Image (cartoon, rainbow, N blue to C red):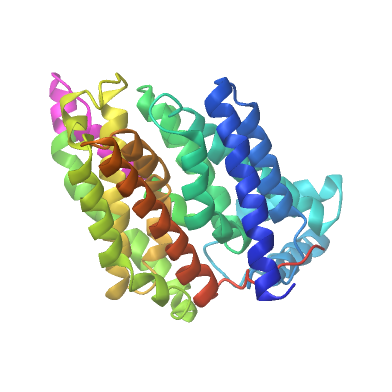
Amino acid sequence: MSIGATILFYILFFVLCVLAAAWSDLSRRPYGLILAALILSAIAGFRAYEVGVDTAPYLESIFYQYETGMSDWQMTTFADGYGQFTRWILSMNANATFLLCVEALITNGLITARLWDFKDDASMAYMIFVYVTTAYLQTLCLTCQYLAISIVFYGTRLLEHKYPLPFIFVVILAMQLHSSAIVGFLFLIIYIILERTYTPIGFALKISAFPLMVVIAILAFKKLTAVYSNYLGNESSVGFMVFVQLGIFITMILATNTIQVFHGRRGGVEMSANAKKYVVIVTLLGIIVSAASYIVPNAGRIALYFTLFSVVFYAMSIRDLRGGRVQAELVSVGLSIWFVLYFIYVFVVHDSLGVMHYSFV
C-alpha cells in the first residue's frame, strides 16, 4: 500500500477497535475489548514480512535456529528462551505468519487484559485510542521486545494484589524472551517503596530499594546501549517530543483531580491507592527515562516498559477533569488532538519503524 492508503487502513481499523472497546464500556463486559484485541492481532499477525524494519531479520534468525538448532541472533537482547519459544511454536506449524499471529495474540491479549483491570476508573475506548496512536504500531517492528513488555505489563497486576514473589517469576520469564525485561524489577522496587510496612524487614527493604534501583537502571542502560548502538537513528525523532510530553503530563495533573491519588481517592471513585500511585509515578518515570535518550543512546527502549502505563494515565485523567463541562470538553478534545499529532509525527513523518507501507502477507 502507499502511505496514504496505509494511513486510511490504520484509521479504519483503529476506529473499529475504539468502537469495539466502547461496546465494553457500555455493556461492562469484556467482549468488545476482546474483539479489539483480535483486530489488532490480525493486523500484526497477517502483515507482510517487509512491514516493520526488524520483521524480516527476526524471521530469518528464527528460522535459522528452527532448522539448525543453532542461534544466529544479531541482537544480543534476544534471550535463548525466545529461540526455544519460537522453535516450539514453529514445531506446531512451520509458518512465519502463524508465528506472527501467535505473538500478536499474546502481546495484544495480555495488554488489553491488563487494561480491563482499570475498567472502573478509565474508559476502555479511550485507553484503546491512546494505545493505537502511541504504542501499537511499535509491536509491528519490536515484536520480541513487546512480547516481553506485555508479560511484564500484565504481571504488574500481581503487585497491585500484593503478590511480589510471583511477579519476580514473571519478570524472569520475560527475561527469557528479551533481556531488556530486567527493568521490570524497577516495578518491584517502586512497589516496595510505596507499600506501607511496620516490620524491620520491610523498612530494610525500603532503605535498600533506592540504591538497588540505581544499580538495575545502570545495568539496563549499559546492556541496551551496547546492543542498540547501531540503532541511533531509530528513536531520535521521538526524543524531540520528550519535553512536550512532560508539558502534557503536567497539564493533565493540573487540570484533574489526579493529585488526589496520593490521598487514596480520585474523582470520588475508590480503587487501590497503590494502583493509582503506580499509574502516575510510572508514567512520569517513562517520560524521564525517554528524556535520558538525549544522553544515553536508545534509552527509549527501556522507557517502553513504563510508557505503556500512560495509556491508563491519560484515560483516567479524562474521567477526572475539573471545572465546567465546556472546559472539560476543551481539554478532552485538545488531548485527543495531541495523540493524533503524536501519531502523525512519530509514525508517519518519522517512519523509522517501517510500518507506513502496510500490506498483507
- The magenta region covers 185-205
Residue placed most toward the observer, 171 or 332: 332
Question: What residue is rendered at 54% in x and 40% in y?
Answer: 111
Quarter holding residue 354: bottom right
Question: What residue is rendered at 56% in x and 69% in y?
Answer: 75
Residue placed most toward the observer, 216 or 108: 108
On screen, residue 147 above or below 62: above
Image spot of residue 107 (x, y percent) = 60, 45
Task: Classify residue 292 as left or right of residue 106.
Answer: left
Image spot of residue 78 (x, y percent) = 57, 60
- The answer to whether residue 113 of the structure is visible from this angle is yes
Quadrant holding the N terminus = bottom right
Residue placed most toward the observer, 66 or 58: 58
Task: Classify residue 236 as left or right of residue 285.
Answer: right
On screen, residue 346 above or below 9: below
Task: Classify residue 222 as left or right of residue 207.
Answer: right
Question: What residue is rendered at 83% in x and 62% in y?
Answer: 67
- In the image, residue 292 lies in the stretch drawn in magenta: no
Residue placed most toward the observer, 302 or 249: 249
Quarter holding residue 34: top right
Image spot of residue 109 (x, y percent) = 62, 38
- The answer to whether residue 175 of the structure is visible from this angle is no
Question: What residue is rendered at 63% in x and 73% in y?
Answer: 53
Single out the residue that lies furthest toward the front: 326
